[in-house]
Image: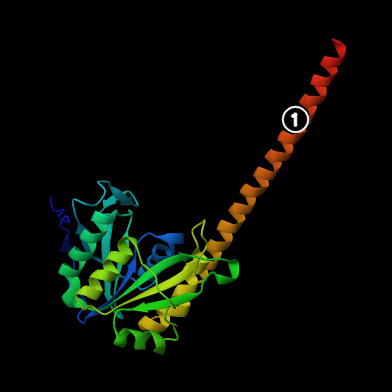
Amino acid sequence: MTDVTPNASFERVTDAPAEPATLVEGLPGHGLVAAIAVDLVTRQLGLDHHGTVTSPAFPRVASFADGRVRDPVRVYAGDDPAVMTLQSDVTLDDGGADALAEGLLDGLGDRLDRVVLLVGAPADSQQQVGDVAGIATSDDVARDLSDAGIALAEGTGLVGGATGSLLAACHQRDVPAAALVVRANPYIPDPRAARAVIEEALEPLVDFDIDTARLEADAHQIEDRLEQMAEQYRRAQTTGAEEHADSTARSRTLSNMYQ
């Protein structure tokens, strides 16, 4: 029996940009780096909802924002600059990832100048958070990365998930694509890594200007919340130890009374 990849379709709801656009992918992944960065780009560039990608392979959920239901996988677009963004409120399994890649390129491939994908990777240390390396599908894209001051990733490796499926589909269809691999906190959402990939890679590569101050504020809020949780845990541990000591003392007293 042969496995068949479920189909996905792109439904356009507004006109496409007048010129071929750069698509910036922001699917959920490690550290939510791509999702955080692309949400900020979409908002600050004032991109409009351009279309949706649907497939029976996607999770059957209802996404909503501000009290209104919306499709979970959406494309936004604008003319100045000619940029599209891809956002998703759901994570996709292998079938959904493959369907997304094929359906997206079927619907938009002829309107794309290039695709830029964001890949979060675990940082080995705090100092490594925000380091960015690039992966190119062609020599021309590799030169674009070099001109933007982005070093190519060294050695060998794999890009998995929906981002990997889209990168592979771009390579197979000769759609110019670059993956920006950014090191991020391995345990929590990382706005600081998202800020780094915008400032160090997306801005010089795509040629737009994004105010990332909000991401630094978000990072501080997360750190403050984690510190509060850690302090609550330390207090709980101290209280538990004191209660255990009191209980042990009472047990010894009772034991002595009945000896």
Q: Residue at x 79, y 27 (%)?
A: 246
Front residue of this view, candidates 259 and 167: 259
Q: Quadrant of the C terminus?
A: top right
**Is residue 13 among what the camera can see?**
no
33 with respect to 51 (left or right): right
Give the color scheme: rainbow, by chain, secondary structure or one colour: rainbow
**Residue sitting at the far front:** 1
Provide residue 39's location: percent of width, then percent of height.
Answer: 38, 65
Amino acid type shown at disc 1: Glu
Nearest to the observer: residue 133 or residue 154? 154
- How many dots with numbers? 1
The percent coordinates of residue 47 (x first, y second) are 31, 70
- Is residue 222 visible in the rendered image? The answer is yes
**Picture quadrant where residue 32 is located:** bottom left
Helix, strand or loop status at disc 1? helix
Whether 79 is drawn above or below 258: the answer is below
Q: How crowded is mark 1: few (under 14 residues within 10 Å), some or many (20 or more)?
A: few
Mark 1, residue position: 243
Q: Nearer the viewer, residue 212 or 101?
A: 101
Residue in view at x 29 percent, y 79 percent: 137
Residue 4 horizontal/vertical position (percent): 15, 55
The location of residue 166, given as percent across then percent down, is: 27, 67
Work out whether 257 lies above or below 136.
Answer: above
Residue shown at 55% from the left, 71% from the top: 128
Which residue is situated farthest in the left direction here?
1
| Residue in the image at 38% along x and 81% along y | 208
Q: In which quarter of the image is residue 85?
A: bottom left
